[in-house]
Image (tube, rainbow, N blue to C red):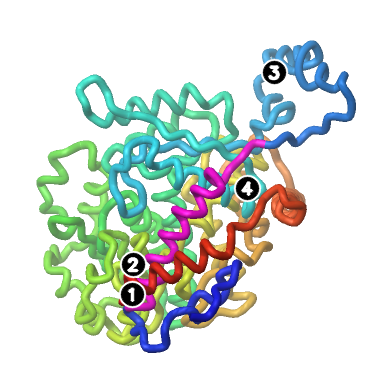
Amino acid sequence: MNKIKMDLSNLNEVFPENFSQEQIAKAKTLFLKRMAEKSHRWYGGKIQTIPKAGVFGFNWFNIWYTPGVSKISTTIRDNNDTSFELTNRGNLVGVVSDSTRVLGDGDCTPPGGLGVMEGKAFLMKYLGGIDAVALCINSTNGKGEKDPDKIIDFVKMCEPSFGAINLEDISQPNCYKVLDTLREECDIPVWHDDAQGTACVTLAGLINALKLTDRQIGNTRIVMMGAGASNTTIARIIIAAGGDPEKMTIFDSRSSLHSGREDIKADPRFYRKWELCQTTNPQKITDFAVACRGADVLIALSKPGPDTVKPEWIHSMAARSIVFTCANPVPEIYPYAAKEAGAYIVATGRGDFPNQVNNSLGFPGILKGALMVRARKVTDNMAIAAAHSLADYAEKRGINPENIVPTMDEATVFPEESAAVAMQAVKDGVARKIMTREEAFQMAKKDIEHSRNMTHSLMNNGFIGSPPAEMLTEAISWAIEQAR
């Protein structure tokens, strides 16, 4: 077996030559999970808190704390907005979750979401130059129910400490009420990354996929598998960006969404789904296989695969079809199988396959843009502006069917995205602070470079160590054995 590199750049080369594509895909998933458990245990998590101010002598403690800091408290008391300048609030995000819909694993209990929320904080810092805190909470009320009002109250109580709130992994229908209530009632951006973040990056990928297949968004037939927070928001954002709802068919676990779904209409908690029932699928197609026939695009965010989406459904789609299968941790169908079935462009939510359509490409830049202008909310227009920024960035450096969106290692995409979002916030009238696009770009670029350089400096100086090479070797050997 070839020795695996610490940067994992040769991951596809370490599997036995006689492994099928299915075995390689399975082994990669197993390796990543095994390595995640081992490395998280070895590091004890992946986020820490370090000072941003210096200690130049003993008396500096009297500046950073008492008695000097009293001046900071009274200044903020007299003008609360100075908290964005005199504390870290202006660059601080609270990542809030009740852990009831963690990736594809469902309810993981409140502390079960910490790994994901720390991950969001990790990516915000490295990719967006933003500080973030994981806040996993218990939303169970006295009746033993998951109560959206408890999440709403918690965020409102936390609002004075943060510049923005990132909601994450909250199950539907609670996620709809939580987001829509907090967007209107908080004076800082409240962003649901599973919904708005996924929608933004999906739209970016769709824009470029349509360019490569000579389609216009308004004339494109789209089938969607899954009607949770992600896909319902994706549908809404696509429509806002010019998609035709009458050419869209959305399926939940029971059937398709259409105006005859009395079960959805009867439950006011699912008002977002009912809105789509009234505007999409006027033919009331209820058979998924029938909906796929001749469709241009399939967007799936549903049950992890790899057998959730059938090859024959893709085979029946229009020529040069576009397939986004973005369930995590395993896509609804593996890319190689979708290609074999006839798909021209395939995207997933994973970075070890081409075309990663994942919210990690969106939220660091979007939240950075909102924070820089001290936005009061993230509007749908800001999310659409971010999508076009991502798509334009990729197109300028070159796109093809295996490369439709930027990747997370293209560092300059994030300040570009941040600047686009900041300018849209100013245009939408939700910015407290006005700046030019160039000022926004340079500020984001400086902060992101600082975060990356600091991380690399900690690594180079041994404050962040490398996991032992034996850990990688054991994980890959185990994954190979399990995949045989």
* Of pointers 3 and 2, the one earlier in the residue sequence: 3
Q: CA distance from mark 1 to mark 4?
A: 31 Å
Q: Secondary structure at mark 2?
A: loop
Q: Which residue is mark 2?
A: 331
Q: Image point 59% across, 72% down: which residue?
A: 5
- Left or right, residue 170 beside residue 463: left
CB under 8 Å between discs 4 and 2: no
Q: Residues within 10 Å of mark 4 (few under 14, many from 20)?
A: many
CB under 8 Å between discs 3 and 4: no
Any mark on residue 76, and which?
3
Look at the picture and state if 383 lies above or below 139. Answer: below
* Of pointers 3 and 4, the one earlier in the residue sequence: 3
> Percent position (x, y) of residue 459?
71, 54
> Percent position (x, y) of residue 87?
70, 28
Q: Residues within 10 Å of mark 3 (few under 14, many from 20)?
A: some
Q: Residues within 10 Å of mark 1 (few under 14, many from 20)?
A: many
Q: Quadrant of residue 210?
A: bottom left
Q: Image point 60% across, 43% down: which residue?
A: 370
Question: Which amino acid type corresponds to the residue marked 2 in the rendered image?
Answer: Pro
Question: Which amino acid type corresponds to the residue marked 1 in the rendered image?
Answer: Tyr
Q: Which residue is mark 1?
A: 334
Give the magenta part as a residue range: 23-49
Q: CA distance from mark 3 to mark 1?
A: 53 Å
Q: Secondary structure at mark 3?
A: helix
Look at the picture and state if 27 lies above or below 278. Answer: below
Residue 32 is inside the magenta segment? yes
Q: CA distance from mark 3 to mark 2?
A: 48 Å
Question: Which amino acid type corresponds to the residue marked 3 in the rendered image?
Answer: Ile
Any mark on residue 125, and which?
4
Look at the picture and state if 420 lies above or below 29. Answer: above
* Of pointers 4 and 2, the one earlier in the residue sequence: 4
